Image: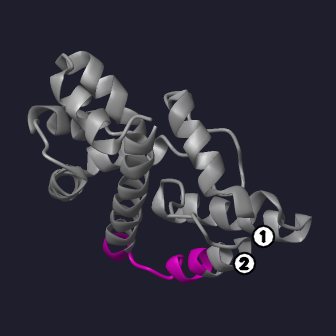
Amino acid sequence: MITASRVLADWNLLNDDVAVAAILPCCGSTRWAQDMVSARPFSDEQDLSERSDAIWLHLSPQDWDEAFRSHPRIGERKAAATASRKSTEWSQQEQSRVEASSSEVLAALARGNHLYEEHFGRIFLVCASGKSSAEILEILERRLMNDAQTELREAVEQQRQIIRLRLRKWLGA
């Protein structure tokens, strides 16, 4: 069995291009992945997660938008064309509880997604793992009331949570 420490130790030794490609599905921002590679070596999962947070929170809005675009809409299976197979697979796992929703809830999520995109100019992003479609719909409706800056901070935080979750999955691969 390959341990998280072994995955991390092996990744620390990869050439930069291969290392960027390996970690990119955890976030979707090329700049984040490049900065993570530049920050190597990491000693353990905590070191990796803490450095990831610091890098993520200091990226530009354009880098954040690149990461946001790598996700499918809540309730949809199709991710952006730029999303990796692994990222798409993880998104489907994270949204698995939504797929079992009634057609009414899925329609409400689709309407909410559309309103959100019209209002904020990007897809609605939430760390969906463990959340029911009703919870996600409630979060979506609440966040539609945010001003642009507040909502950007919310989206950035949700992506940070997704990155942490995916880093754990990646280390467990």
**Residue 136 can be seen, yes or no:** yes
Segment tinted magenta in the rendering: 139-150
Q: In the depicted view, which residue is nearer to us: 21 or 108?
A: 21
In the rendered structure, which amino acid carries the disc numbered 2? Ala
Magenta region includes residue 89: no
Magenta region includes residue 144: yes
Residue drawn at 78 percent across, 57 percent down: 99
Placement of 87 over or under 158, stated as above or below: above
Q: Secondary structure at mark 1?
A: helix
Residue 153: mark in rendering: none
Residue at the farthest front position: 1
Placement of 70 over or under 124, stated as above or below: above
Q: What type of secondary structure mainly makes up the magenta span?
A: helix
Placement of 142 over or under 53, stated as above or below: below
User: How many neighbours does mark 2 have within 10 angstroms: few (below 14), some (14-19), or many (20 or more)?
Assistant: some
In the rendered structure, which amino acid carries the disc numbered 1? Ala
Q: Secondary structure at mark 2?
A: helix
The quadrant where residue 155 appears: bottom left
Residue drawn at 18 percent across, 16 percent down: 15
Q: Position of residue 50 (x, y in %)?
A: 18, 59
Write down the residue under mark 2: 134
Taking the image as shown, residue 25 lies to the left or right of residue 129, namely left
Residue drawn at 36 percent across, 48 percent down: 167
User: How many neighbours does mark 1 have within 10 angstroms: few (below 14), some (14-19), or many (20 or more)?
Assistant: some
Q: Nearer the viewer, mark 2 or mark 1?
A: 2
The quadrant where residue 57 appears: bottom left
Write down the residue under mark 1: 108
Q: How far apart are labels 2 and 1 at the CA level? A: 10 Å
In the picture, the quarter occupied by the N terminus is: top left
Q: Position of residue 97 (x, y in %)?
A: 72, 63
